[in-house]
Image (tube, helix red, strand yellow):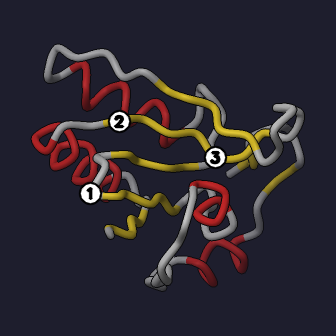
Amino acid sequence: MFMSGGIGAIGEAAMSASAGQDRSIASVNNANEIFYHLDGRHVFFDSGTGQLFFVDAPQGLIASTVQSAMAGMRATPVFEQLHLDIHRLFSAARCVALSTQQADAVLVALRLVGVRATVR
């Protein structure tokens, strides 16, 4: 498996070290705090706002899985790029708003492709 962005291959040791571990996210105040807990195989869903936060390229596993799951429901996801700074120079996580039914389908689809989710 290759890391998006052309950085190089991800070693099996690194993949197996992060697989099978649930991480809890303490109370967070904003999307930037969530960003520090995400990776290419872990998303964060805020059930209060219906927002799914993730770090992935537009054509990456998470984004394409969300698009496929939503296409099955005849819906088109609207992805929002979040930034770490007010000048919008440093990209952070991406976010998509989901209804309750969409969230259920998307979270199951992500789990089926090996992506873990933290639900708050």
Q: Residue 97 carries which label?
A: 2
Mark 1 — residue?
A: 48
Mark 2 or mark 1, whichever is nearer to me? 1
Amino acid identity at mark 3: Ala
Vertical placement of residue 104 versus 15, above or below: above
Q: Which residue sits at x=82%, y=32%?
A: 88
Closer to us: 47 or 65: 47
Instruction: Name the residue that disc number 3 marks.
Output: 93
Q: Distance between the residues labelled 2 and 1?
A: 11 Å
Q: Write the residue at 74% across / 40% down.
A: 83
Q: Residue furthest left?
A: 101
Coordinates of residue 6 in the picture (x, y in percent): 86, 39
Label 1 SS: loop
Looking at the rendered structure, the kind of residue marked 2 is: Ala
Front position in the image: 75 or 111: 75
Up-down relation of residue 65 to residue 116 (above or below): above
